[in-house]
Amino acid sequence: MDLSRNTMARLVLFLSLSVFCGSSQAWTGEIRGRVVCDVCADSSVGPEDHVLEGAEVAVLCITRSGEVINYQAFTNSKGIYSVAETMPESDRWESCLARPISSFSEHCSIRGEKHSGVKFSYKLPSGQTHKVRPFLYKPTSAPVYCSPAAEF
């Protein structure tokens, strides 16, 4: 009986030391961006444009240890999506690719750019947010006020 208690005590001590001494510092990263309906299809965000709620964005990140992590995010009522993760500093994101998947809007569903993914290195310290440029979708037909003749 004493032998099993002794063995159990050693195991508890070993596990405690492993957890408290062997753990690396935690790191938190965040990727954030917006999805917008480019109403006049002019490839810029202007006052006539509006955000797209419920749009789907995929974010793929490669960690320092070589692991590939795939995230899925949806925009909120302000058109903002966000992906965040807390992990050991040794496994933090090294590079990521964010790309739009679907706008889920029947009126604004055409991707604004052919190659609309954004690849970037993630070199920010823990707690910092990497902001991705807005992803644009075009309407199936632009309003009349968007045509050059409407400027006169």
Image (cartoon, helix red, strand yellow):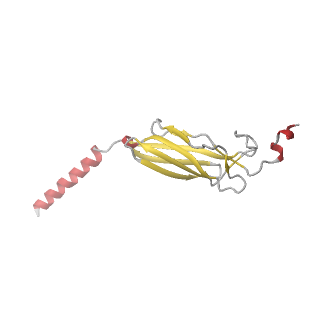
Name the outermost residue toward the bottom: 1
Q: Foreground: 114 or 119?
A: 114
For image coordinates 85% across by 38% down, the residue present is: 151
* Horizontal and vertical percent position of residue 121: 48, 37
In which quadrant will I find the N terminus? bottom left
Residue 107 percent across, percent down from the top left: 73, 54
> Residue most toward the front?
114
Q: Residue at x 80, y 48 (%)?
A: 143
Image position of 58 (left or right of 23): right
For the C terminus, which image quadrant? Answer: top right
Which residue sits at x=28%, y=44%? 22
Residue 33 picture location, percent across and down: 59, 44
Residue 105's image quarter?
Answer: bottom right
Residue at 22%, 54% in the rendered image: 12
Residue toward you, 112 or 51? 112
Q: Residue furthest right?
A: 152
Q: Is residue 11 above or below residue 118?
A: below
Looking at the image, how many numbered discs can be counted on the residues? 0
Q: For this rendering, which residue is in front, 80 or 118? A: 118
Determine which quarter of the picture holds residue 49. Answer: top right
Q: Nearer the viewer, residue 53 or 65?
A: 65
Residue 126 screen position, x and y as percent:
45, 39
Give left or right: position of 100 versus 87: right
Direction from residue 109 to residue 98 in the image, left or right: left
Looking at the image, residue 116 sits to the left or right of residue 64; the answer is: right
